[in-house]
Image (cartoon, rainbow, N blue to C red):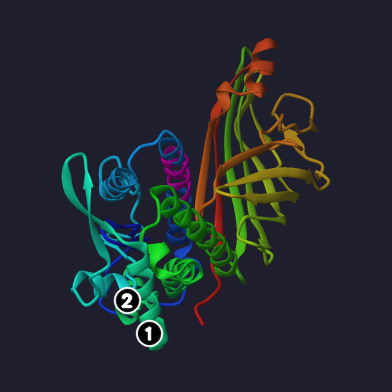
Amino acid sequence: MQRLGAPIIGLMLAAMPASAAPDCVCEQFEALQQELDNAVMLRDRHKAKAEEMERRERAGESPSRLREDYSTWEKDPRSGAGAGLVATTQSRQSAISYVPRGARLIENGTISGWSRTVQRDGYEVSEVDPAKAHAIEKSHAQTGEDLCDFADAAAVEKSAQETSPCKGVGDLLVGHENSHRDTCRRMGFIAFYFRSASELARDEVKAYDAQIQGLKALLGKALDGAEAQFEDDTHMQWSASMFSATYDFKTRQAKGAIPKHDGDSWSVKLKGVHSAAGSNIRAYGSHCTVSGYTRDVFLSVAARGKDVTVTFDRFGATPPTRSSCPGLPARGGSFGTGPEEVGKSFTVPLARESRREEDVGKGEVAKLAAANGVKLTGSYRAKLSIICPPAK
């Protein structure tokens, strides 16, 4: 995200609050995820653009033309670097750029006299005289002036913090621009100022790589003290020629502390309560009742990247149940097979609240029931939540 000569602008989508950004906390988890998505998208696009520029450079295209094409691509809102980025909050688009002091001095005419006139294709054109340019750079260095320093460091810091959802993101934006300054100091201002298009893109890739790692660390830190909580509800209706019943299964109180992690992956074991109840049971013309039960349920929750997988590891012992059907012998009750069998797992997007719904009538249990002349309909609804710790 830098600007040299023709503007080369990296885009950051964020809010414009009236005051500086607050610390990054659990409640901003989705905003941090989106910041990470944006940074990964921008990194990958700049990597692809660098490869394109390198191919065109090897083919002998004009360096100035390639820099112009690259600058146009950076700024194009429809098909350029920032096309399709999603704002972290309701906001406007903001551009944060590294402008070295030397570039500002060139723009206002303080630094001049480093060009020479040459004949090219029958025309007189002006081009950089390397010897003059390096002499000017050396003269500034002898006075202790750093041409790679920010032209306005305070403005960059202010813009970064005011356009970020939280302070950690703002700090990473400043770090991104610092990366370009460090490249300038390593190369020297003149070499930096006249970099090729592929070098411009490669420097962005390097800066975004560091920004991505920082955002992952913020995501991990944001969940310090948070818990994962799971619950589900299953509603099943069975019907056959001489039998019909409604069964309801629930998982509640399944919680576990999310461990410290790197922002990319984590896992936690949950223990909850699984209950079952029957209603509207008819067998051979008799209205029946079946005692319900409560048992333990053990689950695993494993997050990686943008997804999280919930797995039913095992259930505690199922208490005995009894059924009563007037006119029929008493017997042990049966709740059939629920959809939460051991080993069942599903994956949902990782968010502060993720939901999953299934049509029980289209599942494997329904197919097995149908093969035995029993119709099964119903629904399965699950919710995985991240419970943030109390505000400090």
Coordinates of residue 22 in the picture (x, y in percent): 40, 77
For residue 327, which quarter of the picture? top right
Which quadrant is the N terminus positioned in? bottom left
Going by the numbered disc 1, the residue's amino acid type is Glu
Write down the residue under mark 1. 145
Which SS class for mark 1? loop
Res. 92 visible in picture: no
Res. 154 visible in picture: yes
Which SS class for mark 2? helix
Magenta part of the chain:
43-53
Left or right position of 146 against 360: left
Write down the residue under mark 2. 101
**Badge number at residue 190:** none
Going by the numbered disc 2, the residue's amino acid type is Arg
Coordinates of residue 5 in the picture (x, y in percent): 27, 60
| Mark 2–mark 1 distance (CA, rounded to whole Å) | 9 Å
Front-most of residues 72 and 19: 72
- Badges 2 and 1: C-beta atoms under 8 Å apart? yes
Nearer mark to the viewer, of 2 and 1: 1
- Residue at point 32% right, 76% down? 101
Q: Work out whether 125 lies above or below 32.
A: above
Coordinates of residue 97 in the picture (x, y in percent): 33, 65
Most common secondary structure along the magenta stretch: helix
Coordinates of residue 61 in the picture (x, y in percent): 35, 37
For marks 2 and 1 on the same chain, the one whose residue lies earlier in the sequence: 2
